[in-house]
Image (spheres, rainbow, N blue to C red):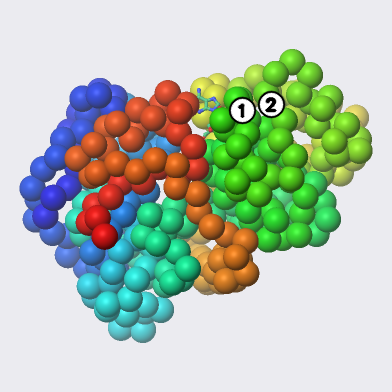
Amino acid sequence: MRAVQIVEESGPESALELVQVPEPGPSDTLVGGEGVVIDVHAAGVSFPELLQSRGQYQLRPPLPFIPGSEVSGVVRSAPAGAQVKAGERVAGFCGLGGFAETAVAPEFFTFALSPQLDFAQGAGLVLNYHTAYFALAMRGRLKQDETVLVHGAAGGVGTAVLQVARGLGAHTIAVVSDTRKAEVAKEAGAEQVVLLKEGWKDEVKQLSGGGVDVVLDPVGGERFTDSLRALRENGRLVVVGFTGGSIPEVRVNRLLLNNTEVVGAGWGAYVMSKPELNREVGAAVGRMVDEGVVRPIVGQSFPLERAGEALRAIEERRATGKVVLEVRPD
Ligand SMILES: NC(=O)c1ccc[n+]([C@@H]2O[C@H](COP(=O)([O-])OP(=O)(O)OC[C@H]3O[C@@H](n4cnc5c(N)ncnc54)[C@H](OP(=O)(O)O)[C@@H]3O)[C@@H](O)[C@H]2O)c1
């Protein structure tokens, strides 16, 4: 089969190579046991693959390896008792191996793909939307009618969070770095959009009538302290990632003085050993797809052999929505 491998950890320009390799077998899953073999139509591209191309991600397999944590496509085979069957359109989280014509995902990480979504949208469904639901509902304890501030709101996680927040009945304020991204955040359903510039925190406080209930932060870096200041009493700041490059530190007296919390949300590590929880999150996201609230926004798509360009778009902060590789174009 055709696949893209990371052959050296030298960054998106030179780390990736298009290769011919044997197809994986059903047992080639990250977690062991028989998985679902998927003929891949589209593969999702995310921040971790960019980090992997430089050897900077926590999951660092021996070289060469096929990156790609999530795919959509058609089931070739599934273990007995699986939720999906051969011939069915699915979205699956495989962890690794997605940048290839065939990939294997654990059964509990494979979900039927609604006819309302195409394969490119399916390739953006599991990682970002499951993270969004986990971070907002389970870690951030978001309630109906509360207000959420979403950083990096035009990105993959950000657009997903905007839609899932709406699905949970909450109000949203998107923070983005430019006007093009503001349009993407609006397309994803943001009720209010604030540009990241001097005074953004005051604008958020004014729009929210004194502060937000939840901040969802995939960016980190310097904005962190102002994010804490943007919370109202009982507010929760949910830490999701650090695309801004630096890991912020918090002076905990701020939490005491304002009665706020900082909460971590690491989806993959938490759900990996909890098949039932995955099904619960999958069902919740599936309901939001049926209601028309969840519609993954595909920003750019590239053919498989141009995976390096896809990683560069993310690296250079140009990406919006989900970046996707077309593996078997429709
Ligand atoms: N915790 C979890 O379970 C979990 C799950 C999935 C992903 N993540 C993490 O969440 C983060 C976001 O992922 P994503 O797929 O949404 O990424 P993305 O689509 O590239 O979006 C990231 C956003 O970060 C902002 N940003 C600020 N500084 C940046 C910089 N120096 N370079 C690039 N972007 C920068 C950009 O928004 P502005 O330009 O508007 O500021 C960009 O839109 C990543 O760190 C990823 O690893 C965590």
- Of badges 1 and 2, the one in the foreground is 1
Q: Amino acid at mark 1?
A: Thr
Mark 2 burial class by Cα count in 10 Å: few <14, some 14-19, many 20+: some
Looking at the rendered structure, the secondary structure element under dot 1 is: helix
Quadrant hosting residue 221:
top right
> Is 322 displayed left or right of 39 in the figure?
right
Looking at the rendered structure, the secondary structure element under dot 2 is: strand
Q: Amino acid at mark 2?
A: Leu
* Picture layout, residue 98 above or below residue 50: below
Furthest toward the top, the residue is 198
Q: Do the residues under discs 1 and 2 have CB atoms within 8 angstroms?
A: yes
Give the residue pinned by disc 1.
Answer: 179
Viewer-nearest residue: 90 or 121: 121
Residue at 43% over, 72% down: 115
Give the residue pinned by disc 2.
Answer: 195
Which of the image's four quarters has the C terminus?
Answer: bottom left
Residue at 45% over, 33% down: 319
- C-alpha span from label 1 to label 2: 8 Å
**Residue 256 x/y as whole percent:** 87, 32
